[in-house]
């Protein structure tokens, strides 16, 4: 199952994967990701989209910083691959480090990415290992990431994740992500403003929310209910379904029809959503829109939903990331696809992979600009970016601000697969006039350095 990159649906999707995933005795918790043994005869191009000289040779000098030697930088890559069997973060680490190292590394130092398999429940164990060995964490994520965040802060380990999932980890200190959810804010305000006021205004007072019956997703359901109301709509129906699975989705479909729900938010796994949509289609009912969320963005959901997509209208917001379907018009997206073909042939380029690539680019360019490579320098350089675009992979994002960005990108699922939606983009693949909605309810707070007795002055 694909992981939603932000919010508690990540956790639910992984929980639901338990019934269909297996654990291999060959899985290892920590595996170095090495570059191909045969190097190119000429250095790889070091440019990526609008970013110039991302990697390259140089004289790095000596260093006594953990994870850094005269010729190497060791970083950790978190993923739940041993549980989910989804290797996209590990694959992206291999692709990026191979390309960067072929271009000369970071000022002459090669990057060694150590895959740290969190296996869903082993986040704290992997964090403690990374605290002993790694310079930083880059390009990964774990569904239960809040389990290790305080340990990460205690050891002053910077994190450049592809995703953040849980309250406590979202917006935590010493963490920089290329386009991140902001603690205390609804992260899809622009998307929902478009749905409720522009695309389907008649649906605004008839929104329904169905969520998996898990604590974290119940909190998300409350957040969506507040945000929809704050944007001028109303949640008229809520429902929970057991995370163990539903044998017959017809009662849920009938309840949606009875309440006249015209906009549906689904907080769960896309396999269950596909079954619900088949049940809705069988009783000849279709809401104006269904937010399938980015958890469903990929080829699997359209295949599972099948003919139901001829009637049901599914959308997903990609956190202002250019969709894969627009690669022909986006050089940065096409570059990722080309690099995967070169360094990881046969591996799928996914939305999480694009997000991970943005994090790798952010880390590499921040480290490149350090005269002396330290954690403080890399973190501070990353936080200086006021319009980070990852070379064109995403809309500009201000990493100096604690507020969410105003840009968004929307894709639509059709019976022919996913495609960019007609949502009025005004900056390439993005629309950047979204409102900002700050929660009034208290849904928890991110972990801070102060909460573990540390401060920024301790970072070196």
Image: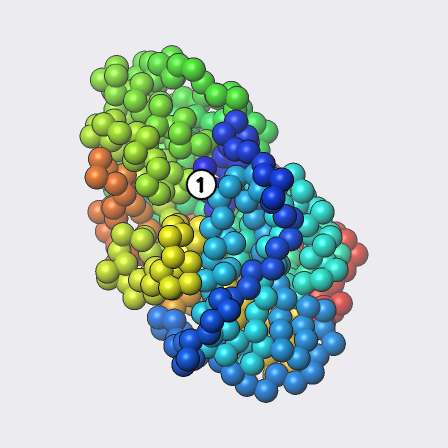
Q: Is residue 218 left or right of residue 250?
A: right
Q: Quadrant of the C terminus?
A: bottom right
Up the image or down, 256 lies above or below 267; here it is: above
Number of residue marks: 1
The residue pinned by badge 1 equals 2
Residue 243, position as x, y percentages in the image: 52, 24
Residue 6, position as x, y percentages in the image: 49, 45
Along the line of sight, which residue is nearer the eye, 170 or 360? 360
Along the line of sight, which residue is nearer the eye, 293 or 446? 293
Q: Quadrant of the N terminus?
A: top left
Q: Is residue 416 left or right of residue 42?
A: left
Along the line of sight, which residue is nearer the eye, 274 or 303? 303
Answer few, some or many: residues within 10 Å of disc 1's Cα (few below 14, many 20 plus, some between 14 and 19). many
Along the line of sight, which residue is nearer the eye, 301 or 7? 301
Q: Is residue 283 left or right of residue 364?
A: left
Residue 112, position as x, y percentages in the image: 59, 66
Residue 361, position as x, y percentages in the image: 47, 67
Q: Residue furthest right?
A: 453
For the point 66% across and 80% down, the residue is 70
For the point 57% across and 73% down, the residue is 110
Q: Which quarter of the figure has residue 59?
A: bottom right
For the point 55% across and 64% down, the residue is 34
Up the image or down, 47 lies above or below 214; here it is: below
């Amino acid at each position: 199952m694909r992981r939603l990159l932000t919010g508690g649906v990540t956790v639910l999707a992984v929980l639901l994967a338990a019934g269909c995933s297996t654990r291999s005795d060959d899985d290892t918790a920590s595996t170095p990701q090495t570059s191909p043994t045969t190097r190119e005869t000429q250095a790889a191009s070091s440019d990526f989209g609008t970013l110039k000289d991302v990697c390259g040779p140089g004289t790095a000098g000596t260093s006594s910083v953990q994870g850094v030697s005269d010729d190497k930088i060791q970083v950790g890559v978190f993923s739940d691959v041993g549980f989910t069997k989804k290797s996209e973060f590990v694959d992206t680490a291999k692709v990026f480090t191979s390309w960067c190292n072929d271009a000369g590394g970071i000022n002459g130092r090669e990057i060694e990415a150590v895959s740290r398999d969190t296996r869903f429940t082993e986040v704290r164990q992997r964090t403690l290992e990374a605290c002993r060995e790694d310079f930083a964490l880059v390009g990964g994520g774990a569904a239960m990431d809040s389990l290790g965040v305080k340990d990460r802060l205690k050891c002053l380990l910077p994190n450049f994740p592809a995703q953040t999932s849980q309250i406590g980890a979202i917006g935590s200190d010493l963490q920089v992500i290329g386009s991140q959810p902001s603690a205390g804010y609804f992260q899809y305000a622009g998307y929902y403003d478009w749905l409720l006021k522009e695309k389907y205004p008649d649906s605004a007072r008839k929104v329904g929310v169905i969520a998996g019956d898990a604590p974290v997703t119940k909190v998300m359901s409350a957040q969506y209910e507040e945000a929809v109301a704050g944007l001028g709509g109303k949640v008229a129906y809520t429902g929970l379904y057991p995370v163990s699975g539903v044998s017959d989705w017809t009662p849920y479909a009938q309840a949606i029809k009875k309440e006249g729900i015209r906009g549906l938010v689904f907080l769960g796994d896309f396999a269950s959503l596909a079954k619900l949509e088949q049940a809705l289609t069988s009783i000849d009912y279709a809401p104006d829109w269904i937010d399938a969320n980015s958890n469903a963005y990929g080829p699997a959901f359209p295949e599972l939903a099948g003919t139901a997509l001829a009637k049901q209208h599914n959308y997903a917001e990609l956190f202002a990331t250019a969709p894969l379907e627009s690669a022909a018009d986006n050089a940065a997206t096409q570059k990722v696809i080309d690099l995967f073909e070169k360094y990881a042939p046969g591996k799928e380029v996914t939305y999480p992979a694009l997000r991970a690539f943005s994090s790798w680019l952010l880390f590499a360019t921040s480290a490149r600009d350090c005269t002396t490579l330290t954690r403080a320098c890399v973190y501070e350089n990353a936080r200086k970016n006021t319009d980070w675009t990852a070379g064109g992979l995403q809309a500009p994002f201000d990493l100096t601000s604690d507020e969410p960005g105003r840009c968004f990108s929307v894709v639509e699922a059709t019976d022919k697969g996913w495609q960019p939606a007609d949502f009025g983009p005004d900056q390439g693949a993005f629309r950047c006039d979204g409102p900002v909605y700050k929660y009034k309810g208290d849904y928890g707070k991110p972990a801070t350095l102060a909460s573990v007795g540390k401060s920024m002055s301790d970072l070196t």
